[in-house]
Image (tube, rainbow, N blue to C red):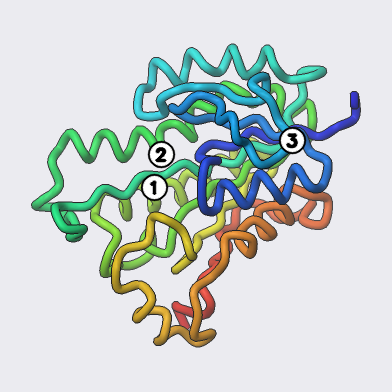
Amino acid sequence: MPDRKTMLLTGASRGIGHATVKRFSGAGWRVITCSRHPFPENCPWEAGPEDHIQLDLADPKSTIAAVDEIRGRLHGGRLEALVNNAGISPKADGGARLNTLTTDLRTWGHVFHVNFFASVILARGLVEELAAAQGAIVNVTSIAGARVHPFAGAAYATSKAALAALTREMAHDLGPRGIRVNAIAPGEIETAILSPGTEALAESLPLRRLGRPDEVAQTIFYLCGPESSYISGVEIEINGGQHV
């Protein structure tokens, strides 16, 4: 379909990314996924190997090299949406929180390459295709980017705070080219990244429950569609009222 919209998504294999692929695919979008893993044979949505790019987001050279491959797979040189969802949150032995003193410097670098620098590389590398489609970028930040979190480590939190700042910078820089840039900051969502004890934390939230990945995916879909055509440079919190 020549008029079919295309989204590029990092971190699609589980949780929020998995739900996002299903939401966009169900609406008729073509979804190109990026992962360090090869294309899964049991992919639960309509896609094929031609819609998957295998790359290691922790390796800048791999990410930079992948941009040309991604560009070559786009139909008509257009990309309607880029969703930077991939994120890693390393823990100490037993799942303990890694703080500023206990996080190895190599771990800091690894986290920032995946959670922050990959988003810079992809946005810069695909800016012409996003401009051609008057597209949207959505960066997935975190509740941990705004305040100290009991489970998320220091490297993860600061990388997400940097991504939130990058969202504002890109909205300013890319807006004149018709590209909208926003972020979503999920709170306690039912995904594999959650730490033990999160269920108890959810009992203190105003909505008294964890969020669902599909609720986050719905917000991403909204930010990539015409209903949000005059929204740019904002970070939407999806946390059940956790910050009130």
Query: Which numbered disc, 2 or 3, marks the residue that appears first in the sequence?
Result: 3
The answer to the question of whether label 1 and label 3 lie on touching residues, with beta carbons closer than 8 A, is no
Quadrant housing the N terminus = top right
Please state which of the two labelled residues, at mark 1 or mark 2, is closer to the viewer. Answer: 2
Judging by the rendered image, the residue that carries numbered circle 1 is 162
Judging by the rendered image, the residue that carries numbered circle 2 is 116
Give the amino acid type for the residue marked by disc 1 in the picture.
Ala
Label 1: state its secondary structure. helix
Q: Is residue 78 above or below residue 213?
A: above
Drawn side of residue 156 relative to residue 100, left or right: right
Q: Is residue 123 visible?
A: no
Circle count: 3
For the point 54% across and 28% down, which residue is it? 122
Label 3: state its secondary structure. loop
The answer to the question of whether label 1 and label 2 lie on touching residues, with beta carbons closer than 8 A, is yes
For the point 45% across and 78% down, which residue is it? 242
Judging by the rendered image, the residue that carries numbered circle 3 is 46
Give the amino acid type for the residue marked by disc 3 in the picture.
Glu
Query: Which numbered disc, 1 or 3, marks the residue that appears first in the sequence?
Result: 3
For marks 1 and 3, give the CA distance. Answer: 34 Å
Query: Which numbered disc, 1 or 2, marks the residue that appears first in the sequence?
Result: 2
For the point 62% across and 24% down, which residue is it? 126
Drawn side of residue 49 relative to residue 92, left or right: right
Q: Quadrant of residue 49?
A: top right
Please state which of the two labelled residues, at mark 1 or mark 3, is closer to the viewer. Answer: 3
